[in-house]
Amino acid sequence: MSSRAILSDQDIPRQWYNLAADLPHAPLPPLGPDGQPVAPEALAAVFPMNLIEQEMSQERWISIPDEVLEILLRYRPTPLHRARALETALKTPARIYYKNESVSPAGSHKVNTAIAQAYYNKVAGIRRITSETGAGQWGSSIAFACGQFGLECKVYMVRVSFDQKPFRKMMMRTWGADCVASPSPETAAGRAILAEDPDCRGSLGIAISEAVEAAVTDPTGQTRYTLGSVLNHVLLHQTIIGLEAQKQLAALGERKVDKVIGCVGGGSNFAGLSFPFVKEKIAGADIDIIAVEPASCPTLTRAPYVYDHGDVAKMTPLMAMHSLGHTFMPPGIHAGGLRYHGMAPLVSQTVVEGLTRAVAIQQLECFDAAVRFARTEGIIPAPESSHAIAQAIREAEQAREEGKERVILFNLSGHGLMDLNGYADFLDGKLSDHALSDAEMARSLACLEGLPRPAAF
């Protein structure tokens, strides 16, 4: 009776899967301030051309460089576990599996793309990387990856997480990166925010503005920006998760998966697990693919599908995505990696086209699910991952009520060992739920007025 599938080094995928090649409708292009599609050259001050080519690629399969594989093989393939103890506790006929991305050096899936992005910047002759981070998983990951390739790294960390999660800062410093709280006095974008609100808790949109500004204003031209989610090439690099999971489910004798679940903020871990299964669904498979977001940041479940900027200062191109508005200020929930106003364009398109669906869950239910998971399976999950666990429990309980066997797969995108302050607050009864009011939503969406709207599919 096997409860774990571990692939050999020889079984690691050698190519990433690009969903853009198989969507029923071609992805909408990013737009510039003039409303016209952005040319690749316009992004060259922000990203190296090799990553821009991946961002705009329509090729179905893109080979993983040997230098990237060499580092990925330090922790990949990651294990697929069957959550038998959780199944027993729930008294469900469902079989629950989780892909354990917490075994990476930084403790989350983010390292998968960090290694690739650091490599492509290195071969393009770049010397310094700037980036942002919410909860710190991405900041830790890009710090690790830059250290592997000898790149300098500076991370702007959202202030509320900078204060909540001090050990993430220590991880970045240990790997040689510089981490500063955002908004900071180091950039024009940061200074403008602080002048308006000296006590601003920050947002990913603000931190992105600072990191992009720091990259494009480097007079040497040797700095580029990296992003841990949202963009096509980031999601591409994460598909190694789902490609491995498909092999592992087959090795455990599962011929069909019924539910595929991941948490979503920007969309990278959800896309990484789900996009290979979306490919199967496009080909006719009956799979329910579920993106789970915080009820306090209901990007997919309540926000419109629009063209919007990815940052507060509007330094990024306009992208077709579900968005709460680039000025949105999220509440300080502990799932810092999910506090983002927008959603990956490819993830948004799968929802619009009916290939995936979205649900929103409140913070207390997610922490309760995380504690149940920890007390059965033993792993303390990241607050972000707790959203996927909460939905998996909902699906397993529904299977019990209906008396039906189902195969449920979710992504454990990272561990929560750097998030124990959040667990302490939950166990001590100090946390509360936060529902975004209609008035808050209306104020946030006001910044979208006058921006172009995506054409209907």
Image (tube, rainbow, N blue to C red):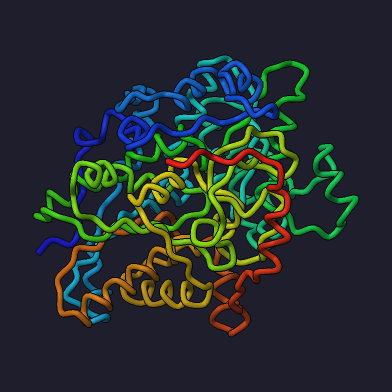
The image shows residue 16 at horizontal and vertical percentages of 33, 32
Q: Is residue 430 left or right of residue 417?
A: right
Q: Nearer the viewer, residue 341 or 29?
A: 29
The image shows residue 159 at horizontal and vertical percentages of 72, 55
Q: Is residue 194 left or right of residue 365?
A: right
The image shows residue 139 at horizontal and vertical percentages of 59, 44
Q: Residue at x 67, y 40 (%)?
A: 451
The image shows residue 155 at horizontal and vertical percentages of 66, 41
> In this rendering, is residue 366 above or below 309?
below
How many numbered marks are there?
A: 0
> In this rendering, is residue 209 above or below 300?
above
Quadrant that contains the C terminus: top left
Q: Is residue 108 left or right of residue 395?
A: right
Q: Residue at x 50, y 64 (%)?
A: 383
Q: Residue furthest bottom?
A: 429
Quadrant that contains the N terminus: bottom left
